[in-house]
Structures are given as structure tokens and as C-alpha cells.
């Protein structure tokens, strides 16, 4: 067994199939399939269940992948230690983030690129629950996300932004007040919600519960641009963070009269030793970057 075989198995597991893994590794699919078969033969067990529609880890595969990730991280840290001793820094950093959460991350990435051009950064976007799990299983090195207090357990957290949310509406939609809205007023309008598991949805749910107001969504979406299009065509209203809302200047924004939904964006990483490339990026992610 060698590191390349581990890398292939991890790629298949993370990408959900042999074709996608081959694209990620820049090899042909037959090479990926052959590597997995050879490793399975060596170990005397199947790591994946294969059907015409899906590829899934077997119990043996579920046990193998976390250990393989740990071995790959250890090898990467050994290479990085040598590079640092030689005055260079290489390696790869996988950064998880939620859709719409940027808070100056592009500036941190630009500074990292200028300082260490040999460091490769992979951005992985997904729902907050998926990113939290990826932090725990080691497939993401750090994340810029909004987590509630319970979700932060077992992780190292540094706050970046505490932000208020606003109600986005079509300019043609009328309001009782010019620039403010109540939860009850918002709930009476056709409401565009994000799917459960989104950090925005969780924050909005908490705020409406605290206000003792129930809303019934007219639409449920998993994409910010889709939500903005529905709002633009006056099919409903949507609550989103102000930093996201200002990216759509043709929408009308209303603040809540009191106790608006808020979310707390933070940089999060697993406990334990931080690889040099990850540490280099962390130095450039600061609260003032928002």
C-alpha cells in the first residue's frame, strides 16, 4: 500500500464516483478503477459498493478513508516541514465556505498567493452541516462559516463578523413603514426561505420563534441568486445578511424594527497541529477583512 493508492481512494470517496475522481486527479478513469481494484485485492476486501447508479463506501471503506486521510496529512506535513527548513512553503489547503460567505476571504487568498505562490488552495462550498463534518473528518483544513454555539464543539473558532440580516423585497412591494418591517408584517407576505441546514435559515428560524411569529414559505431554495430572482420578480420576500443583500442593488432592503436575525461568521479549524500552509493562510484571515 502506498500514498498514491490512499489518495485515489480518498478522491473516489469525496467525489462520489470514479469519473469525478479521475477528473480531480487528472488521470483516466481506468487508472482510478485499476488502483482501487489492486488495493482491494491487496487488502482482501472491497472498499466500495459499485452499482450502475452510485458508488458507496463499504464498512471497510468507511474505516479506511479517515485513516488514509490522516496518513496523507502526515505525509504532507513532513514535506512541508522540509520545505520550511529550505525557506519554501508548498502544500495544499482545503477551505470550506458557505454560499454567500466571503468576508474578505479573497484578500486573504491574494496575500497568501503573493507570499507563498507554491501553496495550492481548494475551495469547497456546501451547507454548514456538511462543512462541519468535513472539518471533523479532515477533508477540510479550515472553514469560514456561520456556526451556532452547539456546532462549534470540538473545533477551534475565531470570530470574524457579527452581522445583521435584512428583508429583501421588490421595489414595487408596499410596506406599512418606509424603511422598517416587523416580523408579523414579513410573515404576511409570500416568503422565500432557504432549505433547512443553511445557516441563514437557522438564524431566521430562531428570530421568528423568538418573536412568536409563524411564517409559511411560498418558495424554498438552495441558491442565493435564485432567491434574488424570485424577489426581483416580486414573487416573495427573503431575509438575507446585509453584506449579501447589497450585491443586488435593484432590490429594496428593509430593516427589522427590533431584534433582527443575525449571524456570526467565523474562521474554524480542527483541534490539533496546524499544517504550515494552513497556518500561513490563517495569518491573513482577520476580522478587519470583512
Image: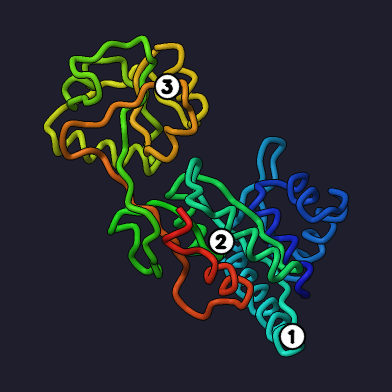
Give the left or right position of residue 52, taking residue 193 as reference: right
> Who's the residue at 77% across and 67% down the image?
5
Label pair 3/1, CB-CB below 8 angstroms: no
Q: Position of residue 116 (x, y in %)?
A: 71, 70
Q: Nearer the viewer, mark 3 or mark 2?
A: 3
Of marks 3 and 2, which one's residue comes earlier in the chain? 2
Q: Nearer the viewer, mark 3 or mark 1?
A: 3
**Distance CA(mark 3)–CA(mark 2):** 35 Å
Q: Quadrant of residue 208?
A: top left
> Disc 1 marks which residue?
87
> Disc 3 marks which residue?
251
Front residue of 282/97: it is 282
Whether residue 211 is visible: yes
Of marks 3 and 1, which one's residue comes earlier in the chain? 1
Q: Quadrant of residue 91?
A: bottom right
Q: How is the image coloured?
A: rainbow
Image height check: is 103 above or below 52? Answer: below
**Distance CA(mark 1)–CA(mark 2):** 26 Å
Mark 2, secondary structure of its residue: loop
Q: Position of residue 217 (x, y in %)?
A: 31, 21
Mark 3, secondary structure of its residue: loop
Mark 1, secondary structure of its residue: loop
> Who's the residue at 21% across and 24% down the image?
181
Of marks 1 and 2, which one's residue comes earlier in the chain? 1
> Disc 2 marks which residue?
140
Q: Which residue is the extreme one toward the front?
A: 178
Q: Quadrant of residue 39?
A: bottom right
Amino acid at each position: 500500500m502506498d500514498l498514491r493508492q490512499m489518495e485515489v481512494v480518498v478522491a473516489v470517496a469525496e467525489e462520489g464516483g470514479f469519473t469525478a475522481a479521475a477528473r480531480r486527479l487528472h488521470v483516466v478513469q481506468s487508472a482510478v478503477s485499476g488502483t482501487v481494484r489492486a488495493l482491494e485485492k491487496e487488502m482482501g476486501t472491497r472498499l466500495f459498493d459499485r452499482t450502475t447508479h452510485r458508488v458507496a463506501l463499504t464498512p471497510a471503506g468507511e474505516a479506511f478513508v479517515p485513516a488514509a486521510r490522516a496518513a496523507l496529512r502526515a505525509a504532507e506535513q513532513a514535506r512541508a516541514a522540509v520545505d520550511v527548513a529550505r525557506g519554501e512553503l508548498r502544500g495544499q489547503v482545503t477551505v470550506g465556505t458557505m454560499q454567500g460567505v466571503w468576508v474578505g476571504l479573497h484578500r486573504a487568498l491574494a496575500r497568501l498567493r503573493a507570499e507563498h505562490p507554491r501553496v495550492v488552495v481548494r475551495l469547497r462550498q456546501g451547507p454548514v452541516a456538511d462543512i462541519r463534518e468535513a472539518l471533523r473528518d479532515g477533508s477540510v483544513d479550515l472553514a469560514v462559516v456561520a456556526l451556532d454555539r452547539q456546532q462549534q464543539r470540538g473545533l477551534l473558532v475565531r470570530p470574524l463578523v457579527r452581522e445583521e440580516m435584512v428583508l429583501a423585497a421588490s421595489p414595487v412591494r408596499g410596506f406599512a413603514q418606509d424603511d422598517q418591517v416587523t416580523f408579523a408584517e414579513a410573515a404576511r407576505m409570500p416568503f422565500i426561505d432557504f432549505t433547512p441546514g443553511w445557516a441563514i435559515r437557522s438564524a431566521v428560524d430562531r428570530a421568528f420563534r423568538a418573536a412568536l411569529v409563524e411564517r409559511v414559505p411560498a418558495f424554498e431554495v438552495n441558491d442565493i441568486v435564485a432567491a434574488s430572482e424570485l424577489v426581483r420578480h416580486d414573487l416573495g420576500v427573503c431575509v438575507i445578511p446585509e453584506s449579501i443583500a447589497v450585491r443586488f442593488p435593484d432590490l429594496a432592503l428593509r430593516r427589522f424594527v427590533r431584534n433582527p436575525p443575525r449571524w456570526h461568521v467565523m474562521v474554524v479549524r480542527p483541534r490539533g497541529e496546524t499544517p504550515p500552509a494552513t497556518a500561513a493562510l490563517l495569518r491573513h484571515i482577520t476580522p478587519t477583512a470583512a
